[in-house]
Image (cartoon, rainbow, N blue to C red):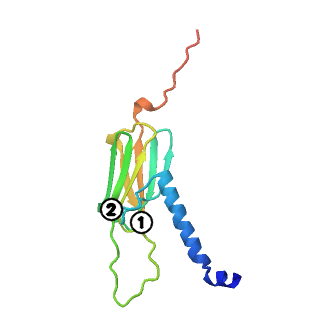
Amino acid sequence: MADKFLDKWEPFRDMLNLRADMDRFYKSFFGGVPEDQEGYWAPVVDIEEDKDNYIVKAEIPGVKKEDIKVTVRDNLLVVSGERSCEKEVKDRTYHRIERSYGKFSRTIALPAAVDPDKIKASYTDGILHITLPKPESSKPKQIDVEIK
């Protein structure tokens, strides 16, 4: 009986199923595109802060600059666009396709207000860099203390 079980056990398939389950869990917990919206994906991001700016870096390799849209409204940054699928070549068998294609969107809640007129975005080597300056009113001001 034990031999029958071992004959059917496929550890790599089970590991892939576990990974898919964990991916769904993280997407549902941390946000992302619902599973039923096939063809949508969300780029991964890093968010930093210095004394003057919030800096967002998004990984979106293989996307043309003109296919990227960046908007800010009500302390929400939205990065969206589309990555086109490479043309399939006939007489070729694909064993695995893991890269995501189709429309993408990522909405990021900013920790505080930003100055929308001074936002800058650049795209180099598949990384979108967005600099969101803090408004002057939110920057800390040093007050000199008089000694009397």
The x, y position of residue 71, in whole percent, is 32, 48
Left or right of residue 102, residue 58 in this image: right
The x, y position of residue 107, in whole percent, is 39, 50
- How many marks do you count on the picture? 2
Residue 80's place in the image compared with 118, above or below, is: below
Of residues 120 and 148, the one nearer the viewer is: 120
Identify the residue at horizontal 48%, vertical 54% (top origin): 28
Of residues 3 and 104, the one nearer the viewer is: 3
The x, y position of residue 88, in whole percent, is 34, 81
Identify the residue at horizontal 45%, vertical 44% (top origin): 54
Residue 61 marker: 1
Q: Residue furthest top?
A: 148
Identify the residue at horizontal 39%, vertical 39% (top origin): 114
In what element is the residue under mark 1?
loop
Residue 29 marker: none
Q: Quadrant of residue 18?
A: bottom right
Q: Quadrant of residue 66?
A: bottom left
Q: Quadrant of the N terminus?
A: bottom right
Residue 95's place in the image compared with 25, above or below, is: below
For mark 1, does the 10 Å Cα neighbourhood hold few (<14), some (14 to 19), or many (20 or more) residues? some
Identify the residue at horizontal 49%, vertical 30% (top origin): 140
The x, y position of residue 46, in whole percent, is 49, 53
Residue 97's place in the image compared with 92, above or below, is: above
Left or right of residue 15, residue 67 in this image: left
In what element is the residue under mark 2?
helix
Of residues 103 and 114, the one nearer the viewer is: 103
Q: Residue furthest left?
A: 66
Of residues 46 and 133, the one nearer the viewer is: 46
Left or right of residue 89, residue 28 in this image: right
- Which amino acid lies under the numbered mark 1 shown in the image of this protein? Pro
Which residue is labeled 2 in the image?
A: 65
